Amino acid sequence: MSHPEPLTTTEAASVPLLWHGDVVVVGGGSAGCAAAVAAARAGARTLLVEAAGFLGGTGSAVLDTFYGFYAPGRSDRVVEGIGWELCRRLLSWDQAFERPNTYGAGTGVTYEPEALKLAWDELTEEASVETLLHCMVSRVVMDEERITEVIAETRAGSGRIRAKVFIDASGDAELAWRAGAAVERPGGERRVQPLTATFRLGNVDVTATPPGELHRLMRAAAESGDFALPRTEGSAHRTVLPGVVHTNMTRVNGVNPLDPWELSAAERLGRRQVHEYTRFLRSRVPGYADSYLLGVSTRIGVRESRRLVGRYVLTRDDVLSARRFDDDVAQCGAPIEDHAGGSSTIWQYVGGDGDPTGMTYGVPYRSLLPEEVSGLLVAGRCLSATHDAHASVRSMAQCMAMGQAAGAAAAIAVSAGRPPAEIDVAELRTALMDGGALLDSPSRPRTREP
Ligand SMILES: Cc1cc2nc3c(=O)[nH]c(=O)nc-3n(C[C@H](O)[C@H](O)[C@H](O)COP(=O)(O)OP(=O)(O)OC[C@H]3O[C@@H](n4cnc5c(N)ncnc54)[C@H](O)[C@@H]3O)c2cc1C
């Protein structure tokens, strides 16, 4: 579909002004919520704009486990700051617990998604973030190369939102694309990871079937021809709620999630797969005979879509060689987890492609900065990275860490009266560490998972 032309200030002037302030964050997922909290805590008047009726994004709509706080093979955390504050709150409510990953991606933090929505409501309110839900940004307004306003669609019609700095945490690089920044997007030869509809089942005895046995039963069921199971592995794990399991099993391949027709078809196919996997689990897997479908993800999970091509593009080599940068604003120890299409998943670890090493690489500030557009930062899964690097850095803990970095950078830019690309990165790194972020965690000898 055609690239939407940005509006000029004159063209946008007839749209009523809805809000103006210092920082606007578009997208209230892991990255956007952390960005808004960081910017507001640093004193910037901050608006968070979210298309859905709740905060947490993919974390609330599709998932229930944060990865990336721990690197595989290490028992100390590699991400703290706002993301870990969120976890502490969920843990203190008994709405989260830590558990080893099925495949060795490091310890995860499994949470109750309804509690996550509430925790983000609280953290944003406590920081005095102003929040608009059910509000969809549709256009950008540019003054030369600087983004000055966005147009948002609300139930009361269109409104103009003005700020000094914008943060694109839309997951799909919506603002960067609309403002004319270079982006990488699906189509042609470019592979994107498959989409997954997750689901929860009630009245399950999850201890009755270990993961290895579940996968063997899946393969046997698929080979028998009795069940159409596009993926014969994946996770069905216990949750905060007794007798309830959360799954990550379905797989919709070959979809461009930015094509409205393909995305609509994927939602329907994902839902059909959910019912097929439920039929398989109920009829073939010990512990599931009397289970029932509690719910399907609010929307199908999109792992990868459009990404910024920014001042630095994080690469597979950066990940596998555990590279550090002078402008690191986050770190990551998660393996490259490429769902790659087909029925299997490829895993490659930081610091080597064999066993987990516990090493981390850095996420440079430049990978949040567009080259062509001023007044804009990008955070979360639409950062500037290649397909392979993205398959490592997209975990929610890293999205929160990037969000915190973008929010802190935006507040520094506002108070210094400079574009985000011209702030003092040393000042940003100090502000992040003062805010609890972990930036320089040395590699440790291998330790056992707790
Ligand atoms: C199936 C699946 C399984 C995964 N498993 C895990 C896992 O187990 N653990 C883990 O840590 N990570 C996992 N990931 C990766 C992780 O969930 C994502 O990379 C991460 O949640 C992305 O966070 P984000 O804040 O960048 O984007 P999102 O959480 O997607 O948030 C983007 C938000 O922007 C909003 N938005 C978009 N456009 C607009 C607009 N124009 N106006 C207003 N709002 C807008 C959206 O509604 C959305 O809420 C998984 C991903 C998928 C899809």
Image (cartoon, helix red, strand yellow):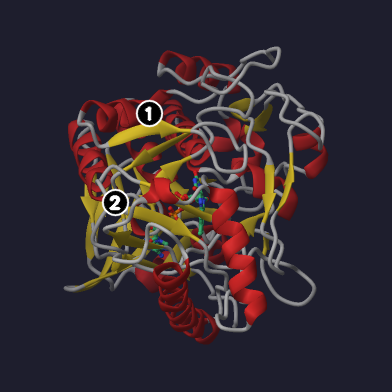
Judging by the rendered image, the residue that carries numbered circle 2 is 55
Judging by the rendered image, the residue that carries numbered circle 1 is 82
Ligand 1 neighbours mark 2 (CB distance < 8 Å)? yes
Q: In this rendering, is residue 255 above or below 9?
A: below
Q: Position of residue 267 (x, y in %)?
A: 45, 78
Looking at the rendering, which quadrant does residue 35 occupy?
Answer: top left
Query: In percent of the image, x 64 and y 16: which residue is there?
Result: 447
Q: Position of residue 375 (x, y in %)?
A: 50, 46
Camera-side residue: 114 or 344?
344
Query: In percent of the image, x 55 and y 83: which residue is there?
Result: 262
Helix, strand or loop status at disc 1? helix
Q: Residues within 10 Å of mark 1 (few under 14, many from 20)?
A: many
Query: In percent of the image, x 70 and y 68: which residue is there?
Result: 341
Q: Amino acid at mark 1?
A: Ile
How many angstroms separate mark 2 from mark 1 (CA)? 15 Å
Helix, strand or loop status at disc 2? loop
Please identify the quadrant where the N terminus is shown: bottom right
Q: Amino acid at mark 2?
A: Leu
